[in-house]
Every structure is written in structure tokens, then in C-alpha cells.
Amino acid sequence: MGELGAQFARALAAKDSSRLTELLHPEVDFRAMTPRRVWEAGSVDEMLAVFFENWFEESDVIEAIDRLESEDFADRERVGYRFRVTNPKGSFLVDQQAYIADRDGRIGWLRVMCAGYRRNGG
């Protein structure tokens, strides 16, 4: 399994829809929890809408990946990543933990827990 999680985090940080489409299985099973909502998607297009129409809007600039760690866990891969994000409201950190299962060499099952946008520096 190994690198799918890190590749996913890098593509998400780059807001690279094309790369995410390559990484995600067409019938991906996605669930996530953010501070105010639970999300579900059963296709790549639905997931991309969650990511780029809800989580990271056009005005959100992901400046850096401050932390990225990935490891195999039983039949899953765990990846943790922290993004430094700026937008008109200020500077934020966004920390997410994800669990991934491979399907035909792509991400076929994905669960994400997000801490939300936290003020950077206080």
C-alpha cells in the first residue's frame, strides 16, 4: 500500500483535481467528519465537490504541508497531514487524519477526520 496516502495529501494540498482523479477509484467509498458535519460520497466527482466546494474554497490558499506522516496499519494505510492555509479571514492550520484501503491500485475506501480551520498562532 505505502504511498497512496502521501500522494493523496500532496494532491489535495495542491488542489490538483486531475491527480486526485488518478488516485481515487471511480467507485470510491468516502466518509468524513468535520467539526460541523458528516460527509459521504460514492464517486470521485462527489468527493471533489466536498474538497473544493466545501472544505477548501477558491479563496483558500494552501501555502504548505507542515506535517505529513504515513504508515501501514493492518490492511489500511493511515496518513496524517497538516496544511497551512490563508484566506481573507486570516492564517489557519488544518489537520486531518485519514485511513485508506487500496482497490485495484487506487484509493477505494477513505475515511477522514478533520480538526477544522484553527487559527495559526493563537
Image (cartoon, rainbow, N blue to C red):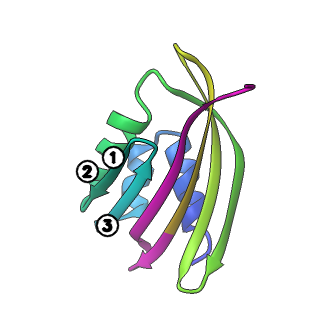
Res 17 seen here? yes
| Res 73 quadrant in image | bottom right
Residue 87 image point, x, y percent: 53, 19
Q: Magenta residues?
A: 100-122
User: Mark 2 — residue?
Assistant: 45
- Which element carries disc 3, helix, strand or loop? strand
For residue 3, side relative to residue 35 (left or right): right
Q: Quadrant of the N terminus?
A: bottom right
Q: Quadrant of residue 2?
A: bottom right
Q: Which residue is mark 1?
A: 48
Instruction: Give the residue at x 36% y 55%.
Output: 21
Q: Name the disc covering residue 60, or none.
A: none
State whether the magenta stretch is mostly helix, strand or loop.
Answer: strand
Quadrant into which the C terminus falls: top right
Mark 3 or mark 1, which has the lower sequence index? Answer: 3
Give residue 25's position: percent from left, percent from top.
Answer: 34, 68
Residue 96 lies left or right of residue 50; in this view the side is: right
Question: Does 104 sit above or below residue 121?
Answer: below
Residue neighbourhood size for the residue with mark 1, other residues' Cα within 10 Å, grouped as few (<14), some (14–19), many (≥20): some
At 42% from the left edge and 53% from the top edge, which residue is drawn? 33
Residues under numbered marks 1 and 2 in contact, where contact means CB atoms less than 8 Å apart = yes
**Marks 2 and 3 close (CB-CB < 8 Å):** no
Mark 3 Cα shell of 10 Å, populated few (<14), some (14-19), many (≥20) = many
The residue depicted at 58 percent of the width and 86 percent of the height is 74
Q: Secondary structure at mark 2?
A: helix
Looking at the rendered structure, the kind of residue marked 2 is Asp
Distance between mark 1 and mark 2 Cα atoms: 5 Å
For the residues labelled 2 and 3, the Cα–Cα distance comes to 10 Å
Residue position marked by numbered label 3 in the rendering = 28
